[in-house]
Every structure is written in structure tokens, then in C-alpha cells.
């Protein structure tokens, strides 16, 4: 068993307005992201399944052409290969999990 205190991980800005930390388990990657209103992640896809758990604020997600708004307590589940774009409608916080791990995903 490994225990990790995410408060001790160095934060970085992966995309303008998205600040957080990334860590990896044996088969999964996790991101803890604070986002700023108006910040956007460009449309992209990757081989991993991706799950977004929104804890604070609101996000607009466009996945394979379908747009939804998600707020606190909501979970977005993206299949592997899904084309997606995320835009912050407010300031907030989300936890993102990817499977399998995205070892190349971290500070630039």
C-alpha cells in the first residue's frame, strides 16, 4: 500500500487556467484540478478511459459532439478515444482519473 498526501505535491498549470497536480498508481493516473472561469481544454482524444468528478463549480463538456453542463456531485465518464473539450463556466475543482495510466501526463 502506498499513501500519498496530495497537499504536498507541487502544483503546476497544465493549460492556462487549470492548476493542479498529477499522480500515478500502477494502472491509473489522477489529476486534482482547480479551474478558473473561462479556462478551456482544447478538443482532443486519447486511448484512456477518463472520468471527471466535479466537486466545485461548473464545467461544460463537449464529448463526440454532445454538450452537457456538469456541476458539483456530477461525474462525466468518457470512453477511450472520445473526442472531448472542457470549458470552465465558473471557478471550481475536479478530480480526473484515467485508465490505463497516462505516465506522459504531468508538468510540461
Image (cartoon, rainbow, N blue to C red):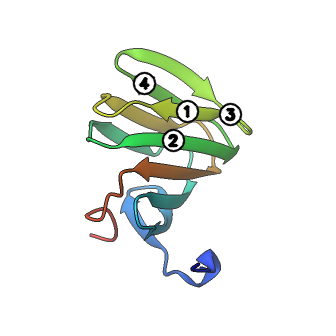
Q: Residue at x 46, y 46 (%)?
A: 39
User: Does the rendering let one see residue 13?
Assistant: yes
Mark 2 to mark 3: distance in Å?
Answer: 10 Å
Check if mark 2's residue and mark 3's residue have beta carbons within 8 Å. Answer: no
- Reading the chain from its start, which is encountered first: label 4 or label 2? 2
Between 17 and 93, the one nearer to me in the picture: 93
Mark 1 to mark 2: distance in Å?
Answer: 6 Å
Report helix, strand or loop for mark 4. strand
* Residue pointed to by mark 3: 74
Check if mark 3's residue and mark 1's residue have beta carbons within 8 Å. Answer: yes
* Residue pointed to by mark 1: 76
Mark 4 to mark 1: distance in Å?
Answer: 11 Å
- Reading the chain from its start, which is encountered first: label 4 or label 1? 4
How crowded pointer 4 is (Cα within 10 Å; few <14, some 14-19, many 20+) is rated as: some
* Residue pointed to by mark 4: 62
Q: Nearer the viewer, mark 2 or mark 3?
A: 2
Residue 47 lies left or right of residue 94; in this view the side is left
Report helix, strand or loop for mark 3. loop
Residue 74 lies left or right of residue 61; in this view the side is right
* Residue pointed to by mark 2: 51
Q: Residue 69 appears in which quarter of the rendering?
A: top right
Amino acid at each position: 500500500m502506498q499513501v500519498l498526501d496530495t497537499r504536498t505535491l507541487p502544483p503546476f498549470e497544465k493549460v492556462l487556467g487549470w492548476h493542479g497536480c498529477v499522480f500515478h498508481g500502477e494502472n491509473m493516473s489522477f489529476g486534482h484540478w482547480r479551474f478558473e472561469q473561462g479556462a478551456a481544454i482544447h478538443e482532443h482524444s486519447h486511448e484512456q478511459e477518463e472520468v471527471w468528478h466535479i466537486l466545485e463549480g461548473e464545467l461544460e463538456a463537449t464529448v463526440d459532439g454532445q454538450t452537457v453542463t456538469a456541476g458539483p456531485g456530477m461525474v462525466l465518464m468518457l470512453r477511450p478515444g472520445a473526442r472531448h473539450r472542457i470549458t470552465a463556466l465558473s471557478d471550481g475543482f475536479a478530480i480526473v482519473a484515467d485508465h490505463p495510466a497516462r505516465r506522459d501526463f504531468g508538468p510540461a
